[in-house]
Image (cartoon, rainbow, N blue to C red):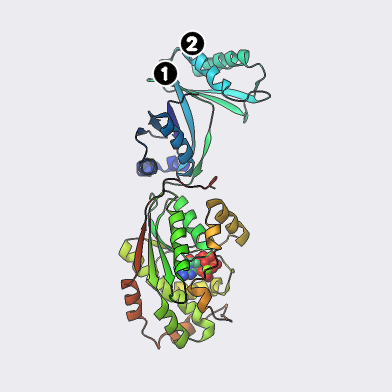
Amino acid sequence: MEWNELLIRYGEISLKGRNRNVFVKKLRNNIKDALSDLKTVIIKPERDRMFLFAEDKSDMEEAIARLPHIFGIQSFSPVAKCEATLEAIKEKALEIIGANETAGKTFKVEVRRTDKRFPLVTNELQLEIGSHVLRSFPDLIVQMKKPDIVLLIDIRIEGAFLTAKVYEGAGGMPVGSNGHSILMLSGGIDSPVAGYLMMKRGVSIDAIHFASPPFTSDLAKKKVMDLAEKLSSFGAAVRLHIIPFTEIQQAIVSQVPDNVSMTTTRRLMLQIADKVREEEGALAIVTGESLGQVASQTLESLTAINAVTSSPILRPLIATDKLDIIDIAQKIGTYDISIRPYEDCCTIFSPSNPKTKPKLEKVAYYESFTDFEPMIEEAIEKRLIVELPLQQKDDFEDLL
Ligand code: ATP
Ligand code: MG
């Protein structure tokens, strides 16, 4: 079957009222970026859908392979064009239906008549084409509700456009259409999933990682770079900031009692993340925290941690069960990276008996004996910045 164009449906972004243009523009740019190595692609956005043309057949196939990974697309269909005459439409309809398995399948025709000059009205054309198809494929069964095959016919001024195939899109919103945030990326299972979910919601991200060499190894660093690279395959480049955290962690261990040191560690990480957030012009901080998962993720702990900043902290996994998080991690391909056995700074410095209900005043009191500020400044100054450009291809199966 020779396809002339792809019809791309937006889904949720088309509900966005006056902001729609911003969303559509972003989606168009994201699709362009994702396909920028293909030579012959042209994208034409319209109010509630977009058309993609590729002169080269292999470019068309590559576009079909990549579109399911671009957020903001609800679904898309390869479309064949013919002259807007009843005869030409009938012929094309048979060709398209013939490319499908028809035995025992249910079927209907749906017409959209953008060009009102076409001599038959919608109902007439539906009937005419439906019965023509049934004469050639008598094993098809007509069904109006949720049929297996829907033959869509769009009559436009430039011609008639037909399709019977709908590919599911990744849903969500175009990355970058909902602003920019800083993701606190550990080497664990949760934070990459949190980053993915925010990207799916249209947020582009910078990632920040705290490393404590020589206690944490180069392989732990590589693991985080691989995770950030994986995230860069979901529609936008990711900048990764690796913060040298050893000196601060050693100061915490020597100055703050064991049972609140985890809270202090988190508070210092958050302060640093917040400063980097400001430098990068990002609006919020994203973490992989999930309520009750560990001592530092009780409501009391989160309260004590939050107190260091008034910036919004987004925790997309706060109410998600671990098994469900693992499920997403496996689907998006971060799981296998996350389970590599190289520990991050928290695991290594983790106290044996952290308080599950730390009191903010107590934590602040213990911290007050140490001047962390110069250490924070130095850590930010000495950070390593790794740019991970948008990955155009990846091996993920279906996204969520
Ligand atoms: P994850 O699986 O994301 O590591 P976790 O269940 O191990 O999460 P914690 O270790 O308590 O939970 O970390 C909670 C959150 O704090 C992480 O999801 C991440 O956002 C942030 N975080 C923890 N350690 C680091 C680190 N070394 N660098 C950057 N962020 C971190
Ligand atoms: Mg962790």
Residue appearing at x 40%, y 80% in the figure: 247
Left or right side of 350 for 249: left
Q: What's the residue at 55%, 67% (across, down)?
A: 341
Is 313 placed above or below 68 here? below
The answer to whether residue 289 shows anywhere in this view is: no
Q: CA distance from mark 1 to mark 2?
A: 18 Å
Say which quarter of the image contains residue 317. bottom right
The tag on residue 116 is 1
Image coordinates of residue 327 in percent, x first then y, are 60, 55
* Secondary structure type for disc 1: loop
Q: Is residue 342 visible?
A: yes
What kind of residue is marked 1? Lys
67 or 356: nearer the viewer: 67
Q: Position of residue 197 (x, y in %)?
A: 49, 54
Q: Is mark 2 within 8 Å of ligand 1?
A: no
Q: Which mark is residue 87?
A: 2
In percent of width and height, residue 157 lies at: 38, 20
Q: Residues within 10 Å of mark 1 (few under 14, many from 20)?
A: few
In this rendering, position of residue 43 left or right of residue 293: left
Within-10-Å neighbours for mark 2: few <14, some 14–19, many 20+: few
Residue 163 image position (x, y, % from top left): 50, 26
Q: Earlier in the sequence, mark 1 or mark 2?
A: 2
The image quadrant that residue 238 belongs to is bottom left
| 363 sits left or right of 132 in the view | left
Say which element carries label 2: helix
Marks 1 and 2 in Cβ contact (< 8 Å): no
In the depicted structure, whether residue 87 falls above or below residue 197: above
Residue closest to the eye, 210 or 266: 210
Give the amino acid at mark 2.
Glu
